Amino acid sequence: LQEAEVKVPEAFQRWRKGRSVPGAEGKHEVEQRVARALAEIATLHEGRRVIVVSHGGVISSTYRYVAGSRYPGTIANASLSTIRSRDKGKTWDVVEYAACNHLAIKQVGFDSA
């Protein structure tokens, strides 16, 4: 993000404010892409568990598409989300979103000598 802020500051500011950026995919287009991908996954893997790995923008868009609203918290890196398909991907349920309990931090001591 720092690179974008320096190289294309106007576009970066538009993006930060949630506005469209010329030449870039908008939120609506991302949500449409997410909807198509989810429908395809549900059709190809009906009744099976599937793991999908993605970046935060798509994960946020997936929540908006599935839940119909913006995610109310923070979606941390390496968090886990679980959604369940009904009706062959026509409707979805949020089971768990942005869970981080697997990321427990352990105290580690370092010897500086």
Image (tube, helix red, strand yellow):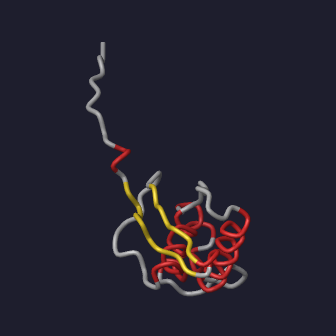
Query: Which of the two residues, 98 or 14, is positioned nearer the viewer here?
Result: 98
Query: Which of the two residues, 47 or 111, is positioned nearer the viewer here?
Result: 47
Residue 90 lies in quadrant: bottom right
Is 101 situated left or right of 80 in this image? Answer: left
Residue at the limit of the structure toward the top, as seen here: 113
The quadrant of the image that shows the C terminus is top left
Residue at (68, 77) in percent of width and height:
33
Q: Where residue 21 appears, x then y in whole percent?
A: 63, 83
Residue 7 lies in quadrant: bottom right
The quadrant of the image that shows the N terminus is bottom right
> Up-down: is 39 above or below 41?
below
Q: Where residue 101 appears, x then y in whole percent?
A: 33, 49
Residue at (51, 78) in percent of width and height:
66
Q: How many marks?
A: 0
Q: Where residue 25 appears, x then y in whole percent?
A: 68, 79
Is 96 situated left or right of 26 in this image? Answer: left
> Up-down: is 37 above or below 49?
below
Q: Where residue 16 appears, x then y in whole percent?
A: 49, 77
> Up-down: is 77 above or below 84?
above
